[in-house]
Structures are given as structure tokens and as C-alpha cells.
Amino acid sequence: MAGMKLFSSESTHSLSFRHSFAAGPSRLVPSRGRVSLDNAKLGKLRVLAMAAKRSPKRLKYSAPRLSKVDDLVYVQVDPSGTENWKLKPVIELLNQGAVGVIPTDTVYAIVCHLKSHSAIERLRRIKNIEPSKPLSILCRSLRDIDTYTTGFPCGDGQGHANIFRAVKQCLPGPYTFILTASKELPKQCVRYGTTTAKYAARKNVGVRMPNDAICLAILEKMDAPLISTSVKWPKENEWMIDPVVIADIYGPEGLDFVVDSGVRVADPSTVVDMIGASPKIVRLGKGPKLHWMDVEDDNESDFSADELIPSAT
């Protein structure tokens, strides 16, 4: 995306994400925005963004609403969705095959257009996701889910609930549902490398409909879902919740844009495996356990959440 055109009449600013933290004090949250997953259960992780203090380094980035830095387009928007007009260049870039970062109702996600094979390959490279790992998709509607998966299980008249009706009540929301992929989904999203892998026969995909004003505004303007993967520190199992830090770390790796709607809370989606006989929670996150969901027994589970959908936001 070198030489990318900036779709704005506003002036650009000479900023540097790569060097913005070297001389600055520690910012926002302990350990430069890191939230460790090792010492707390996922369902109890809460980091209050409002309690974070803004340093002078961060205030420098709050001045421009739309800027281009080293071929990275950085867009700041109000999380309420009142400034969605600023998302136009982001939507155009996605349609051109860009890879960038957007907010969801849980954590930030690296995304690209589902129908851009080259963008999917770049997303895997930027996030260092092995070709054998499945990817998630952010859907605009239940119709998208019907198109790119075989759908949700239905009631069988023998006491099992109609799951589709139940799912409709919690979407959009902070859930990732693991479903069987349909033939409409690009093979790059479900290919599993060698046939010896224990999950090789599972052609699954994680689907999300986030309840976030910015994310929904972008999805509504797309002609297909977005491929998605959560933003974590490159070598650590920790979510990155500050978009400025994300731009600093992943910008040099090839990101084309970052949409900043403020610091997130490190609380990922609840992942529910819909492939088996009954829906089972394999990762409890922001979405509460509902009465029709079972909790996966770690001793009996053949697959962890990371094996099923390592990229779930």
C-alpha cells in the first residue's frame, strides 16, 4: 500500500508512531498497555480506560482527526458513532485490499476484506498466523452467517431448543460462534495444512456480529464480511488495548490504517462451539453464559479455544 492516497482535505501531520514512546513516560495502563492473561480468568479481566491518564505523548495524537504517517492512515473517531463520516477512507481502503485495525465491542481487531486473497495473506503475515489456523469473520447480518456457514442447529422436536431463535436474541453482541464453513467461504480462511493435524477435518469458522457503533458502521458499507483476528502482542498472549500502541507496533509490519475509538477493555468475546450436539462454551469472556449453553469440561475437550479459532476477538 506504499504511496497510499489520503482521502481527506485535512492537512497531514508529521508524526512518528515508531518513535513516540522511546523517551516518554509509561502511559495509560501498566506495562505500556499490556494486560496479562496468565494471572486472571478471562471472564474477570476488567481494565478501566477512564482511569488511565493521558500523557503528553498521547495528546500529540489526539490533535489530528485524520492523518497519514509513514503510509499508515490514522483515524480518530468518537466511540458513540457520531463521527462515522470519518470512516469513508477506511471503507475505500478495505475495498482496495487494505489491512487495518478497527474496534469491536470487545478488543481491537486486525481486519481485511473477505474476498481479497492478497489481503488475507498479508493479514496472516502481519499477525504471524500459521496457514493451518482458521480465521474469524465479522458479519453484517444473520444473512451473512447463512451465506458463509451451514447455519445454526435447529430444534429437533425432542426437547432440544431451536438454537437459531436463541442466538438471534444475543446478536449483535460479544460472542464468537464456531460454525461449519460453507463453500462460499474462501479456502484461505479454513485451510488446515497437513491432514495429520488433529483438527484437519474440522472446516470451521468463528463468526461475530459485534455490538459496536464504529464496527457496525464499517460493516454496513461493505459488500462482504471482514476477515478478523484479535490484536495481541507479537510474542505474548496478551491483548493490546491502546490503538496508539497498536499503530506503533504493527504499523511497521504493514498495516494500512488504524481506527482509534479510545482504549478498550481487555475482555474478549465468549467463544461458543456450535459444532457438537449442544452449544458449549470453550472460552468465557464478555458475553455471559446463557441457559442454553453448556460449559466445556477441560478434561473432556479435544480442542481448545485457540485450536478452534485462535483469532477470535
Image (cartoon, helix red, strand yellow):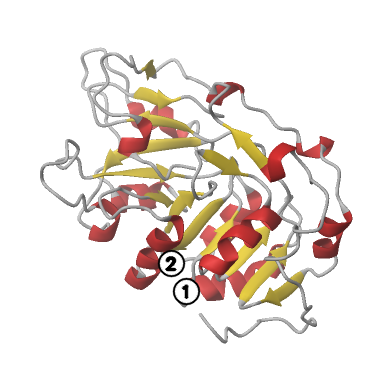
Task: Determine which residue is flagged by label 2.
Answer: 223
- Name the residue located 76 percent from the left edge and 39 percent from the top edge: 49
Residue 169 vertical placement versus 103 (above, below): above
Expressed as whole percent of the image width and height from the top left, the position of residue 68 reads: 69, 76
For residue 300, side relative to residue 249 (left or right): left
Q: Secondary structure at mark 2?
A: loop
Residue reaching furthest to the left? 195
For residue 172, side relative to residue 280 (left or right): right
Residue 158 visible at all: yes
Task: Determine which residue is flagged by label 1.
Answer: 95
For residue 85, side relative to residue 209 (left or right): right
Residue reaching furthest to the front? 23
Residue type, label 2: Asp
- Name the residue located 22 percent from the left edge and 53 percent from the top edge: 191
Distance CA(mark 2)–CA(mark 1):
9 Å
Could you classify mark 2 by the number of other residues whose Cα lies within 10 Å: few (under 14), some (14-19), or many (20 or more)? few
- Which-is-in-front pick, marks 2 and 1? 1
Expressed as whole percent of the image width and height from the top left, the position of residue 233 reads: 54, 47
Expressed as whole percent of the image width and height from the top left, the position of residue 38 reads: 53, 26
For residue 64, side relative to residue 300 (left or right): right
Residue type, label 1: Asn
- Asked where in the image residue 274 lies, by quadrant, the reply is top left
Residue 186 visible at all: no
- Asked where in the image residue 30 lies, by quadrant, the reply is top right
Pick the residue in front: 63 or 126. 126
Q: Secondary structure at mark 1?
A: helix
Badge 2 vs badge 1, beta-carbon distance below 8 Å: yes
Expressed as whole percent of the image width and height from the top left, the position of residue 178 reads: 33, 37
